[in-house]
Amino acid sequence: MEHHIARLRDLASQARDTAAEVFAAGAMRSASEGEIVAMMDAVAAALRPLDALLVEATGEVDARSDSPRPGERMTARYGCRNSRELIERVTRISGRRAGEYLAAGTSVHEPIAPTSGAVLPPQFPALRAALAEGAIGVDAVVAVSSVLGSALPIDAAREAADTELAASARGDGVDGAPPASADELRLQAQVWAMVLDPDGAEPRDTRAARKRGLTFGQCRDGLVAVRGQLLAEVAAQWQRLNDSILNPRLVGPRFVEEGSVESEADIEAGADRRTTPQKRHDALATILTVAARSGEMPTIGGAAPTLVVSALAEDVTEGTGFAHIDGVDEPLSIRVARQIACTGGVQRVTHDARGRVVSIDVSDRVFNAYQRRAIGLRDGTCIIPGCRVPAIWCEIHHVTEAARGGPTHTDNGVLLCWHHHRTIDTSGWQIRMNDGVPEVRAPQWREPFLQWRPVTTSPTMRRRRVAARGQR
């Protein structure tokens, strides 16, 4: 083994020298397209056998760490809690990538019989052979094993699938196609799983439908725990909606005032500090808000499903105290109640000293469909620079609160996504209207000069302003 390790050390040294020469000379810039492709092919051909060795070593680490006694585990002897941590520390790859090597190593590792000490065949012997030949890498092994490893028992049928998929990876498949990529092997493995699964798709669907569900926990510290399992198509639809809210890409500056245009890099820097789970939460909040105002939900008591928030008038006026929401035991802050009320109607109920209702005053502060479309054409997306949530997903914020006399008018409404609407009072961003045009001032941590700037992503508005500057 020492001889093999020394050869690999020499190979790593040669690879480093080659990379240093290519980078130092800028050789890739002057290379022809054919040479670039040949370089990529050569690098991949060198990486696949190295992948195979790392997969084999990973499988052995996992096997030697599979003991009920901590003192007998290889991972414990190296001060690691599990195989993944040991692989991460030694190879300096990510935890996700280490998990892939572990999955591949388990699939092609040759186990030892505990009683006789004999070497047993791996789960996928044909894939193991292709891996050892350098025909495939770790991605291909994971692509196949993740689909067939749990779907089918180890029998003649899965052995046939293993053999055919390994041949397809080499380019020796029955269809004569070129060597398949990892993604192509995954698709082929899914076809094999559907053909060879004795239960078929329908029983799986039935089992999944039986296990589906969502549960809501108690409200604690302003948070409600959600647990459950979604059907695949429901999760896919939810993910697609998340993507439409969180990932829209619009090219061009957000601040359009002459002489003060920020670059795209400036916009991206520090514009959104939310974590990915927080973004998913806010996307769900947006989806629920849009669904509630769509007018297509079933009614409750003859009216659209309405989130009812109650608070004392003096608390709303003074900005202190608490508010309450139907169905939630814990109180909300007045700030949250005011943000909810900004996008809905307000019903002022007056009681006498004994609690009798003596008057009901309804104030409709909801922007109608025509106003929403007009504001959307003017603003384009959420007006906070760096946020690209499109108009259809945004709420309309009263720049001057209705409680302080602000009208429900296009000159007083701007597009804000759910997140920025919820945090507009605490994030440091400031909004004002200048003759019906929204202007934004960034927080001081982002722009020390605290300059007001008009903002829009509407292509029509940008064209008009550029044309006006050209005429000047």
Image: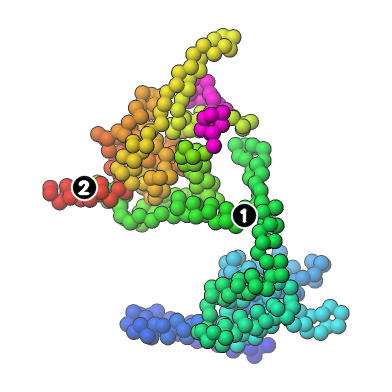
Q: Spatial distance from mark 1 to mark 2, Cα to Cα?
A: 48 Å
Q: Amino acid at mark 1?
A: Leu
Query: With respect to residue 352, does 458 lie above or below?
Result: below
**Magenta part of the chain:** 298-324
Query: With respect to residue 423, does 67 lie above or below?
Result: below
Is 300 magenta? The answer is yes
Circle 2 packing at 10 Å, graded few (<14), some (14-19), many (20+), is some
The residue at 42%/42% (across/down) is 394
Is residue 160 rendered to the left or right of residue 389?
right
Query: With respect to residue 339, does 16 lie above or below?
Result: below
Residue 337 image position (x, y, % from top left): 50, 30
Q: Amino acid at mark 2?
A: Arg
Give the labeled residue for mark 2: 465
Residue 381 image position (x, y, % from top left): 36, 46
Give the labeled residue for mark 1: 231
Is 460 magenta? The answer is no
Residue 456 image position (x, y, % from top left): 30, 46
The residue at 37%/40% (across/down) is 415
